[in-house]
Amino acid sequence: MSREYLNYLIRKRAVVLGFFAMCCLGISIAWAAGGLADTAMLRGSETAAALTMLMAIGFPLVQFSYVHRRSSADRFFALPVSREKQLVTEIAFLFGSCAVCYLVIMCILYAMYGIGHMAAGQFLLILAAVLLSLLEAVLISSCLYLIANSVFDGIMICAAYTFLPLTAAVTVTTFHGSLVAGDHGYSSGLSYLLSPAALAFRFITSVHNGEPVSVPEVLLGIAYALLACFGLYRNYAERKTERAEQLSDSLFAYPVIINIYAAATLFCLACDTVSHRPDFILYLILFVVYIIAQFVYKRKIELKPVYLAVFAGLLAVTHITAYAGWKTHGFGEAERLPLPTENIRTYDYYAYVTPEDLGKADPEYRVCVRVMINIPRGKEASYREAIDILEAYRKKAIDWYYERSADSTGDTGRLNVYGKQAENSYDMTGHLWYGVKEPIPEKDLIRLSEYGSVQVESPVLEESYSLSQYIEKRR
């Protein structure tokens, strides 16, 4: 590290850093003082962590902007300091600025609100967690910004990589929602694993709340930071000064970003196309956006054959994959979905049926039959007959899902399977739900009534009967 260069950076940014630190301190104190004294330190600490994390993400975009300008790039890279020392000094300055700002705020907050309300051990643990996260944020943000060759491209690339984990999560969720029968409530944790910002947020939140910390997630965040160090060396220490204000055409810049986003969007459209009716206007809009993205990258509007070829290739690959997923029941995921494992497993079924035969669908919706069976964990053997009936019916519902076409008129009813901690609880987890094409036969409803509630309702007359009462009344 170069001490002279570090002193220069401090003198250059001192006023701005001092102003930002005062703003962060004022906001943190105001937020801490806005509630109960017992939680004031915790609120102020969370605010300080959030503000300095924003600083750690945004400050590198300001500090490294000189490498993207021809006039300043030649001047800074001509300094009598090796590139390696210059890079280490820059990172040390960025991290040190964020760390000092955070530590000063935290010490003032602890003196005002923490003594007697927060243990010193917890205070030090919070400091360590946030400082580690600040270092990771500085490294990763700097690395992403330096991939580009201009200020605008650097901001765009940082934004693109920031939202990439969310795009991946949406793609996976769309796959499960469209191609995996029963898994329409799927929630993907992929965004956390791919997002260093999300990992840092969960790490800091866990430490603040005194909850157990996920060591693998912490190590994954460190791995992202180490990978960023490699990228920093390649894009700063080995950087050619003539890259400034040129097209950002390196492998991990626009060429990869544009096609990843295009592929993800095309796959989402493909999943919807194979499971529903295709909407061709969306494909046209996506193609126009794809060409606009190429314009942003190349700085000129042109329709090259290679653009058409790549887009057509992505279109073919994503739709073949989605079609294969549809034909294989979500690559077998529909049959492998785990049943809820909470204290109570609930089968909740309803269908609109004819009054004369509760096992026959009625398009006029005259009668609704509803089954509710709660199966306590560990007592499955006592409910074996009911489980066998309902599980066989659930497997039929999976087949019906993949047999339907885009012109299907709708479902007769629905079968829901979910978990609860208690029988009267409304907090449902592990929710699986299936459309019903053919109702459960009446003879099976009679058998199911021995294990739970089977009600027959008349939406028109607003009447409700148990299954035995309805059969007796029908006679």
Image (tube, helix red, strand yellow):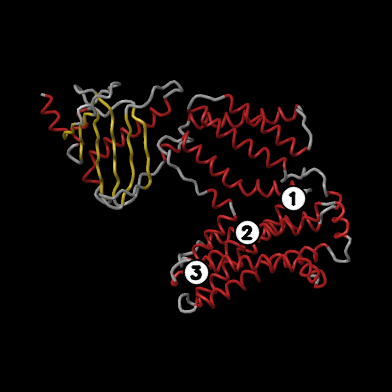
Find out whether the residues at labels 3 and 2 contact each other: C-beta distance under 8 Å.
no
Quadrant of the image containing the N terminus: bottom right
Residue 147 got which mark? 1
Name the residue located 65 percent from the left edge and 46 percent from the top edge: 160
Q: Is residue 375 left or right of residue 1?
A: left
> Front-most of 438 and 269?
269
Q: Label 2, secondary structure: give it.
A: helix
* Location of residue 218 by image quarter: bottom right
> Front-most of 107 and 308?
107
Name the residue located 48 percent from the left edge and 70 percent from the top edge: 40
> x%, y% of residue 134?
63, 64
> x%, y% of residue 322?
54, 31
> Front-most of 142 and 63?
63
Q: Which mark is in front, 3 or 2?
A: 3
Which residue in the protein does label 3 denote? 33
Which residue in the protein does label 2 denote? 54
Nearer-N-terminus badge (1/2): 2
- Kindly report the distance in space between the C-alpha atoms of the residues bearing marks 3 and 1: 42 Å
Q: Which mark is in front, 1 or 2?
A: 2
Three-letter code for the amino acid on which mark 3 is drawn: Ala
